[in-house]
Amino acid sequence: MQRRLFLPILSILLAACSSTPATPAPIPSLAAASPVVSAADTSTPLAVAPNMPLPPPPDLPVVSSPALVHIDFQDAENGWGIAAGDGGSILRTVDGGTTWLNVTPPGLTGIGYSTVLSLLNINTAWVLVPNVDFYTGLLYHTRDGGLTWTSNPVPFGGAFLQFLDPGTGRLLASRGVSLGSNSVEMYQTSDGGVTWLSVFNDDPARPDASGSLPLSGIKNGMTFLDLNTGWVTGTRPVDGEVYLFVTHDGGVSWSRQDIPLPAGYGTYQYMPQAPVFFGSDGFLPLTVYLSTTTEFTFYTTHDGGTTWIGDPANASSMIAPGLYAFADLLHGWCWDGGTILYATTDGAQTWGKISTSLDLGGRLSQMEFVSGTAGGFTGWALTNMDDAGHSQLYRTTDNGITWTSLIP
């Protein structure tokens, strides 16, 4: 199972327990637990599409130079995009980003930066479009590459969303940010997102609130490894604290997971980001705020996140902060958009520098890499929108050395 993470501090804008996990509790049944949030499906359920590319019909409209705000590629040819402007659009590409096809559900508007895209494979996608209150929204689902969609209203807007299979999903919804605190609510679904069960919240005004995931701290990511085990990361100004909380019951309860820090590093502050997993192996990105500089490193796990290994004092594993992407367990990249791109071929143990032909310093908004052909890798770099509402997209097929403009 391959997962990648590309936007390290997305939720910064939204608003002490043992590290030994407790015995996993059973996941509450959607049929028996309370409260259950139900939402009616607005269209006929679709037949499940195979996990291979479906050829788009010839009459899908092509969108020239879309104002992309998010991309997600499943392989070197097949990807999805969210575009802003004129109500926004949901897009697909089958030629590596050269051409973008409009698969937006009829009548859907309000698509843009706050839209959440979650892909399970080339054909299966969920798109969450927040309402204007940002606490409710519409969830759209396709199983045939965007040719047809189902939709239902949901009781959340801004959220981290992840599906583990066609039925099982986990969602962490933001419920507000105030004075360094970020209230959140955790939901589960077992029917592909038609119904959602609230299993956790940390709102002190609610009688069912729990403190196992603290109200304090700004949450910046969520990753689930399987049905039960997941992590939430964030940051708060506490020396020596790595804000990493783990659940072993699908998000019902949480405990802080400690990671080892070298001697003398208890006086610094840290910001972890949601783990990236390839099976039971994974990476935990960690920003380290030293006395005079800020550095970036990756802790690793080979036992499904039970233990994390890393050493911020080891200069060979430390790099300058930037956006990052992993194509597989060994190959990763980190880039701030300037003329030097960091790359690893040994699972983030050491990093080398690549001089690139592209300078997006101050404009890079997303980077992505996937396995290409003949053992190589294909990557994409997306810029922020400029004052004219335009973004640029570039592609590399030589591991980041040279880049070709796809959307100039």
Image (tube, rainbow, N blue to C red):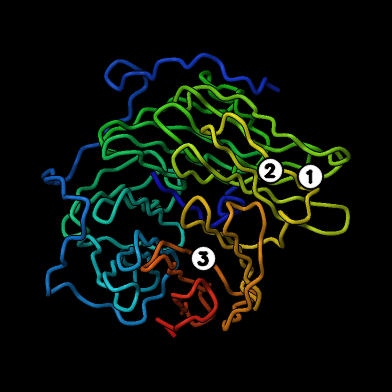
Please report contact status of discs 3 and 2: CB closer than 8 Å, yes or no: no
Relative image position of residue 98 (x, y in whole percent): 33, 78
Report the residue at 68% width, 35% height from top: 216
Q: Residues within 10 Å of mark 2 (few under 14, many from 20)?
A: many
Q: What label sits on residue 18 in the rendered view?
A: none
Location of the C terminus by quadrant is bottom left
Q: Which residue bears the numbered disc 1? A: 269
Q: Secondary structure at mark 2?
A: strand
Q: What label sits on residue 235 in the rendered view?
A: 2
Location of the N terminus by quadrant is top left
Q: Which residue bears the numbered disc 3? A: 366
Please report contact status of discs 3 and 1: CB closer than 8 Å, yes or no: no
Q: Residues within 10 Å of mark 3 (few under 14, many from 20)?
A: many
- The answer to which of 148 and 300 lies nearer the viewer is 300
What amino acid is found at the position of numbered circle 3 in the picture? Gln
Report the residue at 37% width, 68% height from top: 374
Please report contact status of discs 2 and 1: CB closer than 8 Å, yes or no: yes
